[in-house]
Image: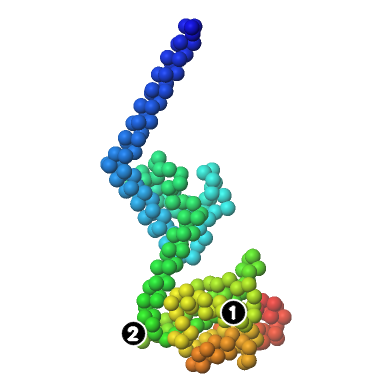
């Protein structure tokens, strides 16, 4: 037979288990309460709308999102989190939306910021495609190495809109593993295809004076003209001006070093 102390421990243990079960049942009831679900949904939509608004603004200004130290004790947590804290101080609805929310639903992680930025980019390119509306266009292409020593190729489209105005739009950046003319040509075709554009619509191409770009026999402009003979090549005026400035600055050693 159990002694009295053991019996008391058994009763206390049973009472604690019953209380825990009641609390758990109450939590489940609250969780599936329609009014509670709607309330949490509204809070989630508020957090999402806030994150999208902040990402859109920072992207429009061309500013970085992240900070070197994003901990709670940091004096500068980066543009995104600092903007969010500033917003919460001035908007009670936003502040309430972040109180007690799950850590995986705050919409503040770096991954979420990138995904929202990608959605913004897709929305912008969609507007560009609608504005082009299948018209003929030219491309401006240049490449350079980033800080991680990777070749990044930037592509700009130039076209005339329905109002007769010449428009230039940045289309995107493409990483290229090689700097050969064939690799650049493939990258250009891939970027255009990803945005629903074709070489057939192309009427002009502007590059720098490098042999792999403007080469008469094996350059990118020749490879594209082999597919579409109407894609006339023009040596980029900005690069021409740079060459002139460099040539003229040679009369002064300090100016030459600067340019």
Q: Nearer the viewer, residue 201 or 93?
A: 201
Q: Position of residue 10 (x, y in %)?
A: 45, 15
Q: Position of residue 147 (x, y in %)?
A: 63, 66
Which residue: 36% across, 27% down? 22
Location of residue 246 by image quarter: bottom right
Which residue: 43% across, 47% down? 105
Which residue: 43% across, 43% down? 102
Does residue 1 lie above or below 112 as drawn? Answer: above
Reading the image, the residue beneath label 1 is 184
Does residue 88 lie above or below 65 as drawn? Answer: above
| Circle 2 or circle 1, nearest the eye | 1
Q: Please, which residue is most extreme toward the front here?
A: 1
Which residue: 46% across, 59% down? 115
Q: Position of residue 91 (x, y in %)?
A: 35, 49
- Figure label count: 2
**Secondary structure of residue under mark 1:** helix
Q: Please, which residue is most extreme toward the left here?
A: 35
Q: Nearer the viewer, residue 50 or 44?
A: 44
Does residue 64 lie above or below 30 as drawn? Answer: below
Q: Nearer the viewer, residue 30 or 65?
A: 30
Say if residue 82 shows up in the picture: no
Circle 1 residues within 10 Å: few <14, some 14–19, many ≥20? many
Say if residue 8 shows up in the picture: yes
Reading the image, the residue beneath label 2 is 163
Q: Earlier in the sequence, mark 2 or mark 1?
A: 2
Circle 2 residues within 10 Å: few <14, some 14–19, many ≥20? few
Q: Position of residue 145 (x, y in %)?
A: 63, 71
**Secondary structure of residue under mark 2:** loop
Q: CA distance from mark 2 to mark 1?
A: 33 Å
Numbered mark located on residue 212 in the image: none
């Amino acid at each position: 037979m159990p002694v009295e102390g053991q019996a008391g421990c058994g009763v206390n243990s049973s009472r604690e288990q019953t209380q825990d079960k009641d609390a758990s049942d109450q939590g489940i009831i609250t969780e599936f309460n329609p009014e509670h679900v709607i309330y949490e949904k509204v809070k989630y939509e508020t957090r999402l709308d806030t994150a999208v608004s902040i990402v859109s603004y920072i992207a429009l200004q061309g500013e970085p999102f992240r900070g070197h130290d994003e901990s709670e004790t940091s004096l500068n947590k980066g543009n995104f989190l600092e903007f969010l804290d500033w917003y919460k101080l001035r908007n009670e609805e936003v502040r309430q939306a972040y109180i007690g929310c799950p850590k995986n639903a705050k919409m503040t992680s770096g991954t979420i910021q990138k995904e929202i930025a990608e959605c913004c980019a897709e929305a912008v390119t969609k507007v560009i495609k609608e504005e082009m509306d299948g018209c003929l266009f030219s491309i401006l292409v240049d490449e350079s190495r980033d800080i991680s020593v990777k070749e990044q190729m930037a592509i700009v489209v130039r076209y005339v809109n329905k109002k007769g105005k010449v428009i230039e739009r940045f289309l995107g950046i493409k990483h290229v593993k090689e700097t050969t003319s064939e690799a650049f040509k493939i990258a250009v075709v891939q970027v255009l295809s990803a945005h629903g554009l074709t070489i057939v619509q192309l009427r002009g191409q502007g590059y720098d004076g490098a042999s792999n770009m403007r080469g008469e026999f094996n350059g990118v402009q020749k490879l594209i003209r082999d597919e579409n003979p109407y894609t006339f090549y023009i040596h980029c005026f900005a690069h021409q001006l740079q060459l002139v400035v460099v040539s003229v600055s040679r009369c002064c050693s300090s100016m030459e070093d600067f340019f």
